[in-house]
Image: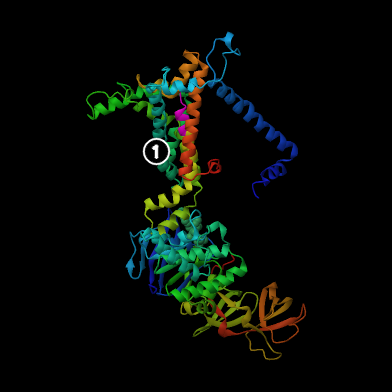
């Protein structure tokens, strides 16, 4: 079993004619990492993966695998294996032939190939299915065959292009855990592509969030969730309430902004933007639904907003409360279920406290849903 | 289980009336236009060529003599073989196979580039150039080839200009013009089915094989060709059958000393007015070509059903 090798993208640009699909990507992926590229459809994720696997050459910049520049090295000569979005199993070959295709290429005997294929089938919990054709398997089983086929090539880096997108929700959640387990078992570098932020956060050691060909932020799931670098990341990863306004004052890592509709609020400037903001700048303040709490009567610390309850939904571990702030601003709050029967009746005015520690301020910019 | 439902499904999809009409039309076409004429030919082939007066008389009995004639000629003792006709037969079959192979080799790369390497302007242009001559009728096309391949034709001129040959090459006598003509006559029947299947191949399959380390040769051998097999089979069947059964092209482009088997059939029907003999020859050709097609399909494990795809 090979241990994972590092993959580095160094100032990579990928252009199709005049269209820039990937702009100045700089990514360092550690060996053995489970690394995800997360972004909406069409943002250039597949394009980056194809540049790593060798199906296209960057217009500019370098792709290094294990420190070695991959320029001029074809996909069949790279230590990567790609799992395609549609799996691309060979429909006319039996499952075991599919899995051991990379060994056939290297000239291994049929007996050797069969033996290895059976081992891998056992590993992905498909023992005894080797003689079937791909069309005889279910979606989840095909998924595992595709993984086994890629692993059979003993790659240093496994590339996965939205491999779970075709599966139903339950299977998808199951396969998340399974993929993560497989990665830990084989110890190689996994580069995973997804537009599903839940998938990226639960599985990855590190995530790169992309928007229209640009990587906005790279970090652990927690870093990206707690300290988003841009309004796009803040609004794409997880839920967030956005308050637009202007910077009124800055005090160290904290800023106070005059919001358009909800008064004056204070919070931390997101780490990536510290030192880059000045008084008077257009800014955005992002509050996670779980960073809002009910201000107990009389203890107004100043960092509050007032809102009326529109609706509430009970979700087991939490209550989701939908409110309307001043100027009809929609706000979502999420409160833990601590045994209360309900939060408040419809139309009731509430004072919501914003925890300045887990709330971030950054320069105004494009949101994911725009 | 599935098979039994074909007719039920057919009626459900088309309605009872429309279903019956469609089946009736197909049955009519098959019986009246295909089976009946063939049966009467089959019947002819087992009868003597008698003057009209004696037809239906006591002498009009079934015989194998027409078939024996192909093998032994007019030798009543069956000592020596009808080498001339048998050679023509063999040569026709072998040449038709060669023409088919030639078309496969020519069309496969073209179909691949058209079907997979999309946006290949060159390949598209090539297809247009291949199709346009089909607006011209077969005879004219054959004569045009005769001129091109002739002593003072374009090809000989070019070869001599390039000093590749000092004398004009007799392409007609060496049957090169004939093979080229036949290969060209049916090339689209090979190209289109091949293109259709190759186009339907998911490009990711090719890339997946490449990603797993396969060379281009292996990708074609293991991925593209197996996928394209039904198309290659249906193209080959058509090219082979039509080449073996061609008449005009061999007539016009064949060398003076070489005959195509269909020309013998034609002579029996037309010149000798011996339909019985002609029918026997034609049926031998039919049975032989069908047998060859079936055998080759069996060898390459292609199902009859795949061909229709
Ligand atoms: N071969 C190509 N030629 C031109 N444009 C392309 C090509 N491949 C991808 N693109 C464009 O690049 C952008 C990114 O595509 P892709 O990487 O597939 O996105 P995704 O993030 O959904 O995987 C899209 O706008 C797509 O249309
Ligand atoms: Mg994609």
Magenta residue span: B239-247
Residue nearer the viewer, B199 or B258:
B258
Looking at the image, which is closer to me, A257 or A365? Answer: A365
Provide the major secondary structure of the magenta segment. helix
Residue A136 vertical position relative to residue B162 in the rendered view, above or below: below
Q: Quadrant of the N terminus of chain A?
A: bottom left
B244 inside magenta stretch: yes
Query: In terms of secondary structure, where does tag 1 sit?
Result: helix
Apparent side of residue B295 relative to residue A330 in the rendered image (left or right): left
Question: Which residue, given by chain and number where applicable, does mark 1 sit on?
Answer: B106
Residue A89 lies left or right of residue B255; in this view the side is: right
Q: Quadrant of the C terminus of chain A?
A: bottom right
Locate residue A61, reporting x and y percent: 36, 63
Q: Does residue A365 belong to the magenta stretch?
A: no
Q: Tag count in the figure?
A: 1
Badge 1: residue crowd in 10 Å (few <14, some 14–19, many ≥20): some
Residue located at (62% from left, 68% from top):
A169
B1, A259: nearer the viewer: B1
Determine the residue located farthest toward the bottom in the rendered image.
Answer: A299
Q: Is residue B143 visible?
A: no
Residue B233 pos. (x, y %): 48, 40
Q: Is residue B188 above or below residue A187?
A: above
């Amino acid at each position: 079993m090979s241990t994972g090798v590092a993959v580095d993208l160094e100032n990579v640009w990928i252009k199709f004619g005049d269209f820039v699909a990937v702009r100045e990507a700089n990514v360092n992926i550690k060996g053995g990492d489970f690394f995800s590229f997360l972004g909406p459809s069409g943002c250039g994720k597949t394009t980056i993966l194809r540049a790593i696997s060798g199906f296209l050459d960057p217009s500019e910049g370098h792709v290094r695998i294990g420190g070695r520049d991959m320029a001029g090295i074809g996909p069949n000569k790279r230590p990567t294996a790609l799992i395609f979005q549609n799996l691309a199993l060979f429909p006319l070959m039996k499952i075991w032939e599919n899995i051991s295709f990379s060994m056939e290429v290297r000239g291994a005997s049929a007996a050797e190939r069969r033996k290895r294929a059976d081992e891998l089938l056992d590993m992905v919990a498909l023992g005894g299915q080797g003689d079937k054709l791909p069309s005889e398997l279910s979606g989840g089983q095909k998924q595992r065959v595709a993984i086994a086929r890629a692993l059979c090539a003993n790659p240093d880096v496994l590339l996965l292009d939205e491999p779970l997108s075709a599966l139903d929700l339950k299977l998808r959640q199951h396969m998340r855990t399974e993929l993560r387990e497989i990665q830990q078992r084989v110890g190689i570098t996994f580069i995973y592509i997804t537009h599903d932020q839940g998938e990226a956060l639960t599985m990855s050691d590190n995530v790169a969030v992309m928007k229209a060909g640009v990587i906005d932020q790279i970090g652990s799931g927690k870093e990206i969730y707690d300290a988003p670098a841009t309004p796009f990341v803040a609004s794409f990863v997880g839920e967030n309430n956005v308050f637009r306004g202007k910077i009124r004052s800055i005090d160290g890592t904290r800023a106070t902004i005059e919001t358009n509709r909800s008064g004056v609020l204070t919070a931390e400037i997101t780490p990536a933007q510290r030192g880059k903001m000045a008084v008077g700048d257009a800014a955005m303040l992002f509050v996670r639904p779980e960073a809002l709490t009910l201000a107990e009567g009389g203890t107004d610390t100043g960092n509050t907003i007032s809102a009326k309850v529109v609706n509430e939904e009970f979700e087991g571990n939490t209550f989701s409360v939908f409110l309307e702030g001043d100027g009809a601003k929609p706000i979502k709050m999420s409160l833990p279920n601590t045994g209360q029967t309900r939060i408040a009746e419809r139309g009731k005015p509430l004072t919501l406290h914003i925890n300045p520690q887990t709330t971030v301020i950054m320069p105004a910019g494009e949101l994911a849903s725009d | 289980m599935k098979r039994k439902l074909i007719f039920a499904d057919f009626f459900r999809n088309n309605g009872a009336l429309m279903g019956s009409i469609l089946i009736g039309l197909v049955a009519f076409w098959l019986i009246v236009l295909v089976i009946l004429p063939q049966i009467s030919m089959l019947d002819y082939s087992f009868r003597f060529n008698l003057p009209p007066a004696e037809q239906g008389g006591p002498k009009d009995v079934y015989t194998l003599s027409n078939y024996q004639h192909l093998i032994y000629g007019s030798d009543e003792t069956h000592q020596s073989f009808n080498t001339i006709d048998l050679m023509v037969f063999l040569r026709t079959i072998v040449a038709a196979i060669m023409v088919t192979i030639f078309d496969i080799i020519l069309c496969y790369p073209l179909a691949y580039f058209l079907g997979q390497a999309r946006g290949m302007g060159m390949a598209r242009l090539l297809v247009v150039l291949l199709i346009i001559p089909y607006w011209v009728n077969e005879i004219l096309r054959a004569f045009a080839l005769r001129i091109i391949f002739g002593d003072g034709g374009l090809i000989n001129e070019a070869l001599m200009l390039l000093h590749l040959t000092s004398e004009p090459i007799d392409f007609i006598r060496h049957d090169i013009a004939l093979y080229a003509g036949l290969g060209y006559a049916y090339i689209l029947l090979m190209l289109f089915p091949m293109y259709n299947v190759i186009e339907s191949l998911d490009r990711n399959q090719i890339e997946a094989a490449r990603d797993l380390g396969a060379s281009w040769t292996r990708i074609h051998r293991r991925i593209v060709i197996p996928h394209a097999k039904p198309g290659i089979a249906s193209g080959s069947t058509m090219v082979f059958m039509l080449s073996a059964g061609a008449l005009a092209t061999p007539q016009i482009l064949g060398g003076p000393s070489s005959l195509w088997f269909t020309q013998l059939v034609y002579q029996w029907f037309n010149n000798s007015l011996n339909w019985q003999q002609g029918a026997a020859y034609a049926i031998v050709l039919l049975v032989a070509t069908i047998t060859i097609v079936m055998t080759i399909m069996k060898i390459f494990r292609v199902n009859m059903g795949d061909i229709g795809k």
